[in-house]
Amino acid sequence: MPSHGQIQGNRMQREIKLLDCPFDGNKGDVIFDNDHHGEWFNLGCCNKECVANNLFYTEEIENLDKSINEWNKRHKIEDLK
Ligand SMILES: [Zn+2]
């Protein structure tokens, strides 16, 4: 079964704090699972219809911290000009 919001198994268990989706305000979520490709995670909006649903899907579980930081980063309008 995929697990939500925490790393299980031989990894250190910790809660992952994700900001709400910048597109529609739904909760950010991260799902961990593994299959014949190995471990993977999918970080994004919990709304499956949202453009950000699969924003960070990767089989490189080492990229998790980077993806969390990217998700939680909020650009100011001034930065985009
Ligand atoms: Zn969303």
Image (cartoon, rainbow, N blue to C red):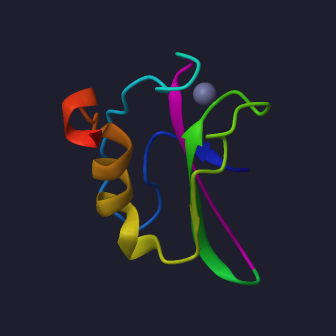
Q: Nearer the viewer, residue 35 or 78?
A: 78
Q: Position of residue 26 (x, y in %)?
A: 57, 18
| Ligand 1: quadrant of the figure | top right
Residue lying farthest to the bottom in this orientation: 37
For residue 31: magenta? yes
At x 71%, y 32%, the residue is 50
In the picture, the quarter occupied by the C terminus is top left
Q: Position of residue 27 (x, y in %)?
A: 52, 22
At x 71%, y 83%, the residue is 37
Q: Is residue 57 left or right of residue 10?
A: right
Main SS, magenta region, reads strand
Q: Position of residue 39 (x, y in %)?
A: 58, 74
Q: Is residue 71 left or right of residue 58?
A: left
- The answer to whether residue 16 shows anywhere in this view is no
Q: Where are the magenta residues, as a range?
A: 26-35
Q: Is residue 22 left or right of residue 79?
A: right
Q: Position of residue 66 (x, y in %)?
A: 30, 62
Name the image quarter holding residue 20: top left
For residue 66: magenta? no
